[in-house]
Image: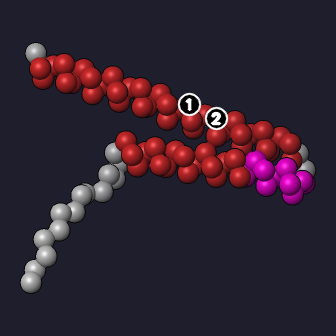
Amino acid sequence: MASVTVEKPLDVGGPISRRAAALANVKWFRALASRALREGGPQAALRAANARAAARIIMRQAKREAIVARMTRAALEAQIQA
């Protein structure tokens, strides 16, 4: 007996995968910052601050991309309805 399954295509390059990648990068940079402070070494505080700044930049860019995508989608829907 053959079973029928419907597979949903992967969201490669779509908004969900971009958000997941951004969150993974933020998590990595935050871990890098805590590791820099924990291990010490030369200019550990500066390296940690740079890693935290990189995480903030990534989050800001991801939010900006989400807003632009939402505006674009709304504009396209309005154009289709008109």
Q: Which residue is mark 2?
A: 56
Q: Quadrant of residue 71?
A: top left
User: Disc 2 on helix, strand or loop?
Assistant: helix
Q: Which residue is mark 1?
A: 60
Residue at x-position 78% and y-position 50%: 34
Name above or below for residue 74 compared with residue 33: above
The location of residue 12, given as percent across then percent down, is 34, 53
The amino acid at mark 2 is Arg
Q: Is residue 24 left or right of residue 2?
A: right
**Circle 2: is it few (<14), some (14-19), or many (20+) Cα within 10 Å?**
some
Cα gap from disc 2 to disc 1, whole angstroms: 6 Å
The location of residue 56, given as percent across then percent down, is 64, 35
Residue at x-position 55% and y-position 51%: 24
The amino acid at mark 1 is Arg
Q: Mark 2 and mark 1 in contact? Answer it, CB < 8 Å.
A: yes
**Circle 1: is it few (<14), some (14-19), or many (20+) Cα within 10 Å?**
few
Name above or below for residue 73 compared with residue 9: above
Q: Which residues are magenta?
A: 32-41
Q: Is residue 31 left or right of residue 58?
A: right
Q: Nearer the viewer, residue 43 or 23?
A: 23
Count the marks: how many?
Answer: 2
